[in-house]
Amino acid sequence: MEPLSFQEYICSLDPATLPRILRICSGVYFQGSVYEVSGNECCLSTGDLLKVTAVALQKVICEDTATGQTTELPLTFKGLFQPAPAPGPCPTLQQPFLESGRQQGLMLQQVLGQWDGQPQLLLCPTISPHALLLHPVYEVHAVMHLRRDVVKIPSTLEVDVEDVTEEAQHIHFARPLLLSEVLGMEEMLPVQAEILEGPAGPAIFKSTWVPRLQRGQWLQLHSRSHTWRVLASAPGSGRHFLLSSAYQGRFRWRPRQFSGVQELAANLQPGRRLRVVVTQDCEGQGDNMPPLGVGDRLEALGLQGNGPDTRLLCHRQEEEEEEGEEMLLPLDLGGSFVEEVCDSKKYRLEELLERQTLPCEVRVVAPDPGLDRDVLGTLPALRLEARLDQPFLVGSFCEEPDKGFEILPQWLDFSILPSDGPIHPPAPCTRRSRVEELTEAFYYQLLAQLPSGLAPPPPRPPKPAQAGTGPGGRHPSASRSPVPNAPLARARLTPPLPPLPAVPRPSTPSQYGQRSPPGDAGMESDSAEHDYETVDVNMQKTSRKMQTIFPF
């Protein structure tokens, strides 16, 4: 077949003969050219092959032969066309008119359906009194070698083509795949594949195998992994990890620390008790909120009220009283609390998730014996944040088939070219994927995609101003001379005590949290030595109490 312009070939193509294989020949762009086709860059070079799979009429350009003016006709154009008188033999399009005896004309779709691709002068009074030429423009769907998507090319592309369907029947048009597509094609696994384009974007894992995922590298994709993952962070270190369910280390519960009532409320979970010990004294707020002392044991029961009046209902257990008392703590109350944990058992990762909802804090007390170096064993604490059930692919490099790794295509996707023929490689060892350290940027990107329940608690609301206080909680009379009859004023006149090491303050009386009012300044000064002895005794009691609560 002699080469034709792409437009001529497509206009004369019978759709019933598809698919057809075309070779790009010399034309306007002899050395090949780059086109923007359907938003994607497409390069057609001399000698390239196209497999045309479909042709769709896109638009029709109508040219007035007298004026040269062109008009784009919609595909729903209702005007009728008739053949223009022409000398010589009867043109092909005119001969249907004569055979059918239809003098009223043909619709646009009828004209195009009976056209043999040769120029034909037509008349259409709706458009112009002059002779017209129709130029249909088709959208050609074609498959190219090493292109993932079907290429959509306009038939007006200025290249010449020749039909090589008969001699090119044996040619296979290789289609690249994304790693994410392979997840849904388990029947093709295991398979060897060449990386065509490495992962785009910033790195997500700090593993040594990730930088090797470059163009030209050959992989063996073995199977789909059925393990799940747990997102974890090391508090205070800025390090983040993904733990596989195959991790063999052992964990122990670690008491959580809370810096304020707001954090206590944010960590309440339905059906689970939250018991804490006060580690910092908290002053009371009038008759409605008793003070808290170091060593007080509280159980958070739930929230009461709405809006600014929301309070946390807690039960305080007294040593000398079995029943204890209930109290309502405002959410803006500060202080420091530590979770009361009396379980010293060592748990596997799966056992932890069965007994405790996430997030929770743990410590690795027995590293994974299958890892050369378990980095988790060197961390003082680990916060388990969320379970991830996304599917992974087990892979290895062809030069190291026994050293496997697990890839998550949802986050680490790239294009590959699978090879032909089945392979039967042995299953690789994937121990090094039991713990993957994440980059900080990817950790926060991942955290944003997880359910909102993992978001940090909202900021603590500002403390409401007490009656008679100015901005910042400062009393307006602080800069004036003290009032003689006020106990607080007399306390301010008391000479400062000699400096002492920082010690916890003694526990408060249990009479609904009411402390005895400060006595006369002189009496307070005279009893300073007795107070030091009381503080020392209380320090010893508090130390013994904390050791009892946290034996490990």
Image (cartoon, grey):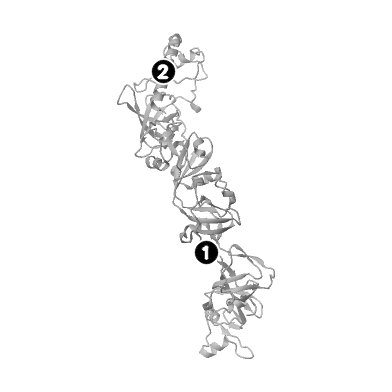
Camera-nearest residue between 512 and 163 = 163
Camera-nearest residue between 54 and 225 = 225
Say which quadrant the N terminus sits in: bottom right
Query: Alpha carbon of mark 2 to alpha carbon of mark 1: how far?
Result: 79 Å
Residue 78 image offset from top left, x and y in percent: 52, 78
Residue that numbered label 2 is attached to = 538
Q: Residue at x 48, y 15 (%)?
A: 492
The disc label shown at residue 421, or none: 1
Against 363, is 184 above or below?
below
- Which SS class for mark 1? loop
Number of other residues with Cα within 10 Å of mark 1, as a class: few under 14, some 14 to 19, many 20 or more: few
Camera-nearest residue between 302 and 73 = 302
Q: Report the amino acid beneath label 1.
A: Gly
| Occupied quadrant, residue 4 | bottom right
| Occupied quadrant, residue 193 | bottom right
**Total numbered labels placed on residues in the image:** 2
Residue 497 image offset from top left, x and y in percent: 49, 13
